[in-house]
Image (cartoon, rainbow, N blue to C red):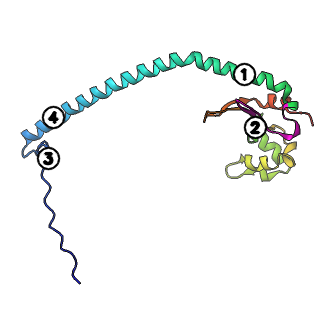
Amino acid sequence: MRGKKTAPATPKAANPHTPKPPTNLGEANNVIAGIAETQRALDAINGRLNTRVTRLQEAAMTASQPLQTRLDELIAGLLRFATPRRAQLLAGGEKSVALPSGTFGWRLGSPAVRITTSEEAVIAACRALGLQEFIRIPPAELDKQAILKERDGKAKVITGVEFAQGETFFIKPVGLETQLTKKIAPETAQEAAPAA
């Protein structure tokens, strides 16, 4: 069985607007002058575009500032309402409160190691306590991941190390894809935690 014969490819016609390559130094000089002229024209267009974009951004920031201020105030007001009532709002082990207009609640962030003195002082404290597993060598530096894993064990006794776990207050209004959040400082999170 024979395969189909394909027609030979027709040569692509040259673009009539494509400049011809130079053939001598005089023409090469003219090409460079043309490159400079073309680039200046492009730079001018981009400059006008950037100026317009900057003006639009400034106008949008000015127009959105009162709305952002109101949004921040509404979130802060809901947080002020919810924080003292947290235990009753989250009764039964709930993590959030669902209302017809949306949901709000609290989420714990990831725990983190916070060094309250110099790292060298903490390394010295680890060595004095025989806790070499918290020191990476060389160079001598703290292994914060190892310390974090032992936050409820050996690492609790290291002077200069604290464990922080921030919290986020979140609001998810119905009909919005965006979830709004406000970070709560670790100290506030501990104060606001429901009594056990």
Distance from label 1 to label 3 (Cα)?
Answer: 63 Å
* Between 139 and 17, the one nearer to me in the picture: 17
Q: Which mark is residue 15?
A: 3
- Name which of mark 1 and mark 2 comes first in the sequence: 1
Distance Cα–Cα, label 1 vs label 2: 16 Å
Direction bottom: furthest residue: 1
Tag 2: residue type?
Answer: Arg
Q: What element carries label 1?
A: helix
* Badge 4: residue crowd in 10 Å (few <14, some 14–19, many ≥20): few
Q: Name the residue under label 1.
A: 76
Residue 139 seen in render: yes
Image coordinates for residue 195, horizontal then vertical, percent: 91, 34
- Tell me the kind of residue under disc 3: Asn
In the image, residue 90 lies in the stretch drawn in magenta: yes
Q: Give the range drawn in magenta.
A: 89-105
- Measuring 37% from the left and 22% from the top, which residue is drawn there? 52
In the picture, measured across the screen, residue 6 lies left or right of residue 45, that is left
Q: What residue type is labelled 4?
A: Gly
Q: Residues within 10 Å of mark 1 (few under 14, many from 20)?
A: some
Q: Where is residue 15 in the image (x, y as percent from the top left)?
A: 14, 47
Extreme residue in the right direction: 196
Q: Where is residue 120 in the image (x, y as percent from the top left)?
A: 74, 40
